[in-house]
Amino acid sequence: MLIVSLSSLLLTMHAAHSAVGDRCCEINYHELPQYELIKKNSRSKQPIISRKVVSNVSECEQFAASKKSLAFNFVSARDRAGSWENTCQALQCPEDHNMTTLTPAANHKYYSMYPVFVPPDNTTVKCIPKAGVFLFSSDHLNYTQARTFCRERKASLAHVISEERTEGLARFVSPSTPRYVGLSNIDSERIWKNEFGEPLSCFDYRAWGVGQPSHSKGCVVLASSPVKGTPPSWEVAPCYISLPFICEVIPLPIQQRSSRRRHKQRSSR
């Protein structure tokens, strides 16, 4: 009976490990980001990460993705020999909803990973270069309510499992007011994972504060230290506490990606 029980336990542990392993593999197989044409004969004056002469828009997309660019300008102009030449300008951030740094420019096209959207009330929009676009809500909600708030606005509680994300977002977090982010351990699996179901064990980066995680179950807040030079940290909080939170805007809805992919496949036939 003991042998059977041990065997069952080992099989259960192996199945759980395999399930986590499968999800870790899925992280490595994410699709390349998708960019959509937002405006013709216009260019964004957002800071340029890098630039390259390219043959076409598809090559520009690949170049922009390799630089973790959130948007790009595709420029067609004549070179010194009089031939047409295409230049890809990989941008640090996309335009905001008011297109404040978009200017008219002949033979320019502006592409972005993000659809044009109007931010919800009581939120501030911030771009973290190479990471994404985020909504900082001043509303105080519990974790479940914050999650619902984000999802209803085609967003998710912010993914923070990287140095550039944690430190980039923490620059906008007050030391006196931590904010909920997308990392929790609240379901039957009893593992820390983000809002996309990706286990923390799949990532190398950690930003737990001293003595954290303080509980084996709970919801994570991003805390900024009042001491200069001290890095931000993840802290575990009871999920029922009402706090401000950070949403991450989801680039290009999945249905748009699928529709665009089908269009490309039809075009290539």
Image: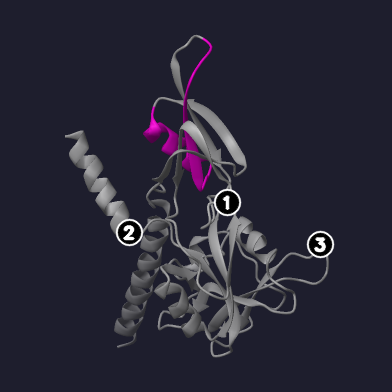
Q: Who's the residue at 54% across and 55% down the image?
A: 96
- N-terminal of the pair, mark 1 or mark 2, is 1
Is 10 magenta? The answer is: no
Query: Mark 2 — residue?
Result: 254
Q: Nearer the viewer, mark 1 or mark 3?
A: 1
Q: Is residue 227 left or right of residue 94?
A: right
Q: CA distance from mark 3 to mark 2?
A: 39 Å
Quarter holding the C terminus?
Answer: top left
Secondary structure of the residue carrying tag 2 is helix
Q: Who's the residue at 48% across and 61% down the image?
A: 202
Query: Mark 1 — residue?
Result: 100
Q: Nearer the viewer, residue 13 or 104?
A: 104
Which kind of residue does numbered mark 1 sit on? Thr
Q: Who's the residue at 53% across and 11% down the image?
A: 80
- For disc 2, the neighbor class at 10 Å (few under 14, some 14 to 19, many from 20) is few
Quarter of the image where one finds residue 170: bottom right
Q: Is residue 227 left or right of residue 231?
A: right
Q: Is residue 196 left or right of residue 99?
A: left
Q: Residue furthest bottom?
A: 240
Q: Residue furthest right?
A: 228
> Up-down: is 18 above or below 223?
above
Secondary structure of the residue carrying tag 3 is loop
Query: Mark 3 — residue?
Result: 229
The x and y percentages for residue 215 are: 59, 84
Q: CA distance from mark 1 to mark 3?
A: 33 Å
